[in-house]
Image (cartoon, rainbow, N blue to C red):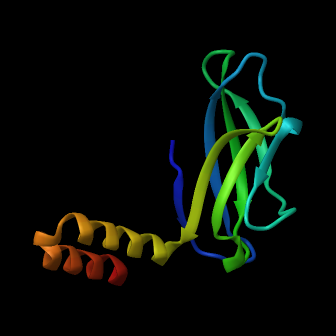
Amino acid sequence: MKTLYGSKSGQDVKVTVAVPVIANPPPQKSALRWFGPIANSSIMSMVFQQDVPYKHWINSSIPIINQNYFGNYTLKYNMTEVITITINAEGLLLFKFFLIAKNKFTKNYEYIKSFFNFLISY
């Protein structure tokens, strides 16, 4: 399950999140709620059955209207935490990758630096 997302921001920008769940009976859409940096943001969610009756996808569309929308989002079902995801600005995600790689692979710092420069120029 993907928990780290990079995105741009803007009026029509949305991040689509698909959360696999096992439940019988199926999850009720009315019991799903996302909690994030912006209170009362309109996050749309749908529940879809997978190949067997007890496996489902919760597909959600999270708006990223401006920089205030970046951060952690927690999906709760009947107020029980299901998952927390993080949505960062696209460039910030690459920068974090660069810092992690630099710290873990200090011997290859020049290689990591050139690879990072390639990514941001692409």
Q: Quick check: 51 above or below 107?
A: above
Identified at 75% across, 34% down, the residue is 47
Q: Height in image: 117 above or below 46?
A: below
In the rendered image, which quarter contains the C terminus?
bottom left
Q: Residue 94 placed where, x, y %?
A: 40, 72
Percent coordinates x, y for residue 110 in the rendering: 14, 79
Between 15 and 38, the residue placed more toward the observer is 38
Decide if residue 106 is on the left or right side of residue 76. left
Q: Where is residue 80 in the image (x, y as percent from the top left)?
A: 75, 36
**Residue 46 appears left or right of 109:** right
Q: Residue at x 84, y 60 (%)?
A: 42
Task: Judge whether 24 appears above or below 14 on screen.
Answer: above
Q: Does residue 35 appear left or right of residue 73 in this picture?
A: right
Number of residue marks:
0
x and y, in percent, of residue 71 in the image: 63, 66
Where on the picture, by quarter, is residue 38? bottom right
Residue positioned 32% across, 72% down in the render:
98
- Foreground of the two, 73 or 46: 73
**Residue 59: quarter of image:** top right
- Please report the residue visible at 36 percent of the width from the left and 81 percent of the height from the top: 120
